[in-house]
Image (cartoon, rainbow, N blue to C red):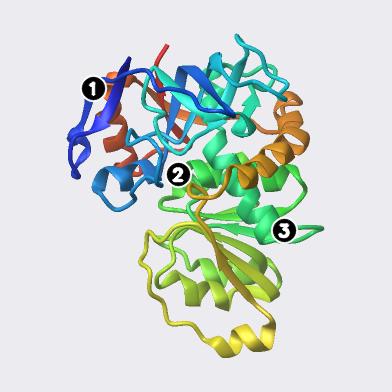
Amino acid sequence: MRAIEITKPGPADVLKLCERPVPAVKAGEVLIKVHAAGINRPDVFQRLGSYAPPPGASDLPGLEVAGEIVDGDLTGSDFKKGDLVCALVQGGGYAEYCVAPVPQCLPVPRGLSALEAASLPENYFTVWSNVFDRAHLRGGETLLVQGGTSGIGVTAIQLAAAMGHRVFATAGSDDKARACERLGAERGINYQTEDFAALAKSLTNERGVDVILDMVGGDYLPREIACLADDGRISLIALLGGAKATVDLGQVLRRRLTITGSTLRPRSVAFKAAIAAQLKQRVWPMFEAGKIKPVIYEVFPLEQAAAAHALMERSTHVGKIMLQII
């Protein structure tokens, strides 16, 4: 099969087209003939040498795919050979064939193409796990999304807004801030020219926001604490701004704040299966009803994966960058 491999740690052009054996499936796995795969920031980190695959995972990049089940162990599942599915994988997505644990596969939502479905797993598994399971966004609570035009940001805005929450989102330009608003954010905040912490307080009548989805870390953390409501929660999913921060622990104590974080890739199949079940029950019907939608910015053929990575690193996109394989 054709695949994209990381020839050595480095810039986007270290991604090269290669020939690899079709991967073998184990018990509980299926082989997917990949129609499309998503590009995600962890793929970039892996290419740079700062985010190694978990033990036993493919060394090929790619954490989400959609395509046709062509082989594998379907015991106890609702799938059969020939079904179109999308799947969250630990690696190997930039290829014509990819293996996936059956519990991490979901049917392609009715009305969506395989390309659109391939844009969903990494972001929706991550957002559901961190915003709704870990940070417990509920009731009439408010959400602040950092990086609102990333794949994660677009997902969090749409999903929280569709579930009736007030959402605010940061972005790096006025145009991107307005894009956040078109996706469902009540207010997009240009972090280059506006103080997101002050605005978050102002927009909530000085109460503060209940949950912050943070992919920045670093010096954002004390500012986020300042604009949290009492009993507020910060859910960290990446550290684009650095791994160290100075935190006023007195605020955490007095106002009962929670700072939590997680990475999805190394978690167990059982953990991801539980998220998949929630997505199928609660989120997939929203796609089929048109309440939320995939947001795809640009599509590249497999052999242009390096150009897709270069685009992601420029951070000019709104939504997902994708590889079309079939």
The correct choice, above or below, for 266 with respect to 70 in the image is below
* Foreground: disc 2 or disc 1: 1
Residue that numbered label 2 is attached to:
175
The correct choice, above or below, for 293 with respect to 233 in the image is above
Q: Are marks 3 and 1 in contact (CB under 8 Å)?
A: no
User: Which quadrant would the N terminus be assigned to in this image?
Assistant: top left
Residue that numbered label 1 is attached to:
17
Query: Which residue sits furthest right?
Result: 139
The image quadrant that residue 216 belongs to is bottom left
Disc sitting over residue 137 in the figure:
3
Q: Secondary structure at mark 3?
A: loop
Q: In the rendered structure, which disc, 3 or 1, sits on the residue that comes first in sequence? A: 1
Judge whether residue 248 can be spotted in this image: yes
User: Which quadrant would the C terminus be assigned to in this image?
Assistant: top left
Relative to the observer, which residue lies in front, 163 or 4? 4
Disc 2 residue type (three-letter): Asp
Q: Secondary structure at mark 2?
A: helix
The correct choice, above or below, for 64 with respect to 235 in the image is above
Q: Secondary structure at mark 1?
A: strand
Relative to the observer, which residue lies in front, 9 or 1? 1
Disc 3 residue type (three-letter): Leu
Judge whether residue 185 can be spotted in this image: no
Graded by Cα atoms within 10 Å as few (under 14), some (14 to 19) or many (20 or more), the crowding at tag 1 reads some
